[in-house]
Amino acid sequence: MTQTTESAARDDDRRTAPADARRRSTRPRVHRAWIVAAVTFVTIIGGAAFNSLPGLLIDPLHTEFGWSRGEIGLAVSIDMALYGLTAPFAAALMDRFGIRRVVVAALSAVAAGALASVWMTASWQLMIYWGLLVGLGTGSMAMAFSATVTNRWFVARRGLVTGILTAAGASGQLVFLPLCAWIVDVHGWRPASVTVALAALVVVPFVWLLMRDHPADVGLAPYGGSYVEKPAPAVGAATRTVRVLLDAARTGPFWLLAGSFAICGASTNGLIRTHFVPSAHDHGMEITAAASLLAVIGIFDIIGTIFSGWLTDRFDARRLLAVYYALRGISLLFLPMLMAPAVHPPMIFFIVFYGLDWVATVPPTLALCREHYGEDSAIVFGWVLASHQVGAALVAFLGGVARDAFGSYDVVWFASGALCASAALMALVLRRKPADGAPKGAAVG
């Protein structure tokens, strides 16, 4: 009789066990968070494919249509600016409609813009297809996308995952730059644009079948955390995005992070990604050789960003940023002396170094957003990313104008080196988050 009673009690315990305990008992050996992170990685690669093209197409478009480099640079700057300005709204839209729907729509916009550019005949069309459609699409898959996935699916290893997902953009560059350079050189720029459109479309099924919006959708806790119910869809996404900006804009750390990250964008996407290939070509280097050097940057970017994520989990993010920006600025001051018709060891050293430092700034910047802005950190980071792309857009445009005016890019390299020094100072004056009750503005010295 006692044995029967004990058996019944055990049955009752199993029936009344908490839902999260039952989920833990059936937890898969490989946590689903890593599958979601892998899909995110591949998605960013597909979206980043188009970012490989602008630097390769400046000379072909200038030759075929007679458009000035400043004119082409303006289209690229519209793309970069919209990329950044879309990001914070995309993070809020993901809260409202889900990650899968937003990303699938974004990939479709990138493919449409890339395909439409094949038939363009006027520069205003370049600004619509490259600037508007691709800018909106890639902006919806920007780093705010990575931040949303990381915040929802990971508690442990956030710095490492941020570094890995940030490196996805470099991986896209590594895969597509040499391929697109070869296609442009042998077959022309139009087949390269079609290749990029197909790359974006190929990713769509992976997102739809394997991506999930929240760990609760599959009955799991975030990696390294406790089970939480999926929150209700957020309403008023645009209103919330603007409200978060207005709140963050009242704090000093936001402006320091936004200002330094604007310089980061100016010295990477705006400067090197857009103008390195035409600058090297000015010095007699073949386009395929210059594009291969950018691809090498992509290799070391992956290493540097993942390592930066590992460092961010262990060291002061502010000091890491100061070191990254200072070293980047010093390297840019030497670049004009390294330009030559052929690839030589000092140039390879620059490429390796710049690759390691390319977006190593992202993990510590995102960590500082989390520290200061908590649950709103993904949207705040989206606005910080917007500043990154505005900085990139300005230099993409002004770099082309400077080349038209001075006949070389030397002044652009020197000015960008000085900007990086100021970014290092911004990082140094950013203080830790103040204690509870202290005014947020007190976080700035």
Image: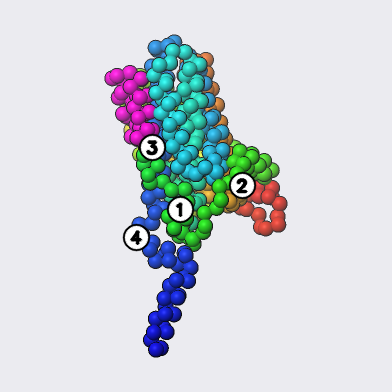
Extreme residue toward the bottom, this view: 1
Q: Element under label 3? A: helix
Q: Residue at x 60, y 49 (%)?
A: 373
Q: Are marks 4 and 3 in contact (CB under 8 Å)?
A: no
Left or right? Give the position of 80 relative to 63: right
Say which residue label 3 marks: 204
Say which residue label 2 marks: 430
Q: Nearer the viewer, residue 106 or 434?
A: 106
Instruction: Give the quadrant of the N terminus.
Output: bottom left
Q: Nearer the viewer, mark 1 or mark 4?
A: 1
Q: Quadrant of residue 207?
A: top left
Q: Identify the amino acid type marked 1.
A: Asp
Q: Nearer the viewer, residue 365 or 332?
A: 365
Q: Nearer the viewer, residue 430 or 408?
A: 430
Say which residue label 1 marks: 217
Q: Are marks 1 and 4 in contact (CB under 8 Å)?
A: no
Q: CA distance from mark 1 to mark 2?
A: 38 Å
Q: Identify the amino acid type marked 2.
A: Leu
Q: CA distance from mark 4 to mark 2?
A: 41 Å
Instruction: Looking at the image, tell me whether mark 4 or mark 3 is earlier in sequence order.
Output: 4
Please, what is the dominant secondary structure of the magenta stretch? helix
Q: CA distance from mark 1 to mark 3?
A: 20 Å
Q: CA distance from mark 3 to mark 2?
A: 40 Å
Instruction: Report whether residue 6 is seen.
Output: yes
Q: Residue at x 49, y 62 (%)?
A: 226
Q: Which residues are magenta?
A: 174-203
Instruction: Looking at the image, tell me whether mark 1 or mark 3 is earlier in sequence order.
Output: 3
Residue 53, image x, y percentages: 40, 26
The image's mark for residue 425 is none
